[in-house]
Amino acid sequence: MRTAKGDAGMGFMDKVKTAAQEVAVEAKKMGAQAQGALSEAQLKRRMDDCAKRLGYLYHQERTGGSAPSAETDRLVLEISELESQIAQAAAETKIKQAAAEAQAPQPSPPPTSTPQPPAPPPQGSP
């Protein structure tokens, strides 16, 4: 039979365990978010580089009078592909975060203690 002190100690350990599990879940979520943000940033940087080159080509075509080049078409296609990859990376990040949240421990019900009968009065009392 557990004493009241033992029950309190066990409740404290349960709280510590639950808190540690919650921290682990949050760390997984943050890791997934950071990884996704890095991937998206790299894709956006590549897309910006393509847009910059496309702008220079457009300027050259407009001021030089040259016809649109195959390079222009290639850059437009690459930008479109990068936009799709960015959207996919964002969706994957959300999925990973949701999976980490699903692994979160469910709060356990509070411990129940069996009622103790009242202590008998000390002997020798009037």
Image (cartoon, grey):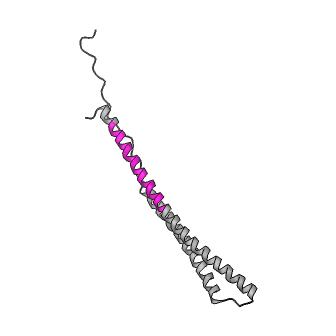
Total number of numbered discs in the rendering? 0
Q: Residue sitting at 55 percent across and 72 percent down?
A: 43
Query: Considering the image in quadrants, where does the C terminus appear?
Result: top left
Whether residue 79 is situated above or below residue 68 in the rendered picture: above
Q: Residue sitting at 39 percent across and 41 percent down?
A: 110
Q: Is residue 125 left or right of residue 76?
A: left
Whether residue 56 is situated above or below residue 10 in the rendered picture: below
Q: Residue sitting at 29 percent across and 22 percent down?
A: 119
Query: Considering the image in quadrants, where does the N terminus appear?
Result: top left
Q: Is residue 46 left or right of residue 27?
A: right
Q: Is residue 111 visible?
A: no
Whether residue 96 is situated above or below residue 17 in the rendered picture: below
Q: x%, y% of residue 98? A: 48, 60
Whether residue 116 is situated above or below residue 120 in the rendered picture: below
Q: Which residues are magenta?
A: 9-33
Q: Nearer the viewer, residue 99 or 61?
A: 61
Write down the quadrant of residue 54 in the picture: bottom right
Q: x%, y% of residue 101? A: 46, 57
Q: Is residue 25 magenta?
A: yes
Q: x%, y% of residue 30? A: 48, 57
Q: x%, y% of residue 104? A: 42, 54
Q: Is residue 80 visible?
A: yes
The extreme bottom residue here reads: 67
Q: Nearer the viewer, residue 27 or 121?
A: 27
Q: Is residue 16 magenta?
A: yes
Q: Residue sitting at 64 percent across and 85 percent down?
A: 72
